[in-house]
Amino acid sequence: MDISRFSDEIPALEVRNLRKRFGRQIALDGVHFELQQGERLGLLGPNGAGKTTLVRCLARRIRADEGEIQILGAPLAPGGTLSVLGVVPQELAIYEDLTAKQNLKFFGKIHGMSGRRLRERVHWALDWTGLSDRSGQLVRYFSGGMKRRINLACGVMHAPKILLLDEPTVGVDPQSRERIYTMIDSLSAEGCSVLLTTHHMEEAEGQCERLVILDRGQIVADGTIDVLTDQAVGSSRYVRLRIHLQSGCIPGDLLSSLERWEMEMISESDREKIATMRMHEVAKNLPNLLEEIHRSGVLVTDVEVQSPSLHDVFLELTGAQLRDV
């Protein structure tokens, strides 16, 4: 595919009304979203939401029943090679009986590289992963984080313009995770468009400019974290109060007031309790509540106001029920 003729205004990736069924199970039910050129987009969803099926459709591992996938304005063909697309699966797609250098050469050749170009890309990949000094070592002896880095490098040997990353940091230590983030940063700096699938909310918040949340085969949210937070929980904030009870119990009139706020109460001791609630218009309502508590003779020893996190937004949109799929 000749990408030089495409405008920067054309989405790097566009998915239109994608549907996929496995027997009676609907995996994708009219999925529609775009990945802009140079963007880092996070794909989130609970177990069984359809994320893996979507990525496999994009990577042409399976064919959708309906819908269309476009890469830089052109339909994604069912066969052949696509040099602008890179795929890094969650399952390690490397050969443990080969060295790091041999793996990189192998995947480079799969993408049509040879000679000087292949040597240059292998050298780049070893330096990029920080594994130049381990180039001749069998991958089977690598740590989990090192394997993840080689796995990522093998998926980008051909310098793709669009990269599908499926759980790239699963099962790795914090140091390896930071190294992988640095590697992804360098790809983004070169203009690569990244679709990142992850279960780590903090990873999605820190690494993605926009988020798409998939649930039961459908897109339930699409936007920046601020937009999704406003849509899911609005202006509410979580309020946490530590209160000290002189008599060991909450006065009846105050208890009724706290119940109106749907507070959750946790006893730290006979006289110390932690009260938590979701409160709208905190600047207006919290001072009134504190004054009411003070008038009842109860002492507030600590106040904490917390903005909703992506974790809160995710549970609000997809529910808190455990999914075993």
Image: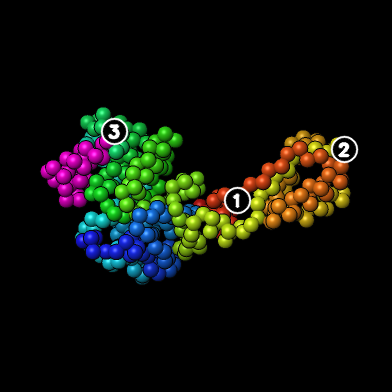
Q: Quadrant of the N terminus?
A: bottom left
Which residue, given by chain and number where applicable, does mark 2 sit on? 247
Residue under pointer 3:
131
Assess disc 1: are there few (<14), some (14-19) or many (≥20) residues with their C-alpha within 10 Å of its C-alpha.
some
Q: Is residue 60 above or below residue 122?
A: below
323 w.r.t. 124: above or below: below
Give the left or right position of residue 220, taking residue 277 as reference: left
Residue 34 locus on image (x, y percent) = 39, 63
* Amino acid type for the residue under numbered disc 3: Leu
Colouring style? rainbow
Which element type, helix, strand or loop, lies under badge 2?
Answer: loop
Say left or right for 138 vs 203.
left
> Pointer 2 and pointer 1: residues touching (CB < 8 Å)?
no
In space, the residues marked 2 and 3 are separated at their CA atoms by: 64 Å
Amino acid at circle 2: Ser
Report how far apart the C-alphas of labels 2 and 1 lie in the structure.
Answer: 34 Å
Residue 308 badge: 1
The one of 281 and 25 positioned closer to us in this rendering = 281
From which residue to which does the magenta span run? 102-127
Q: Are marks 2 and 3 in contact (CB under 8 Å)?
A: no
Give the mark nearer the N terminus: 3 vs 1.
Answer: 3
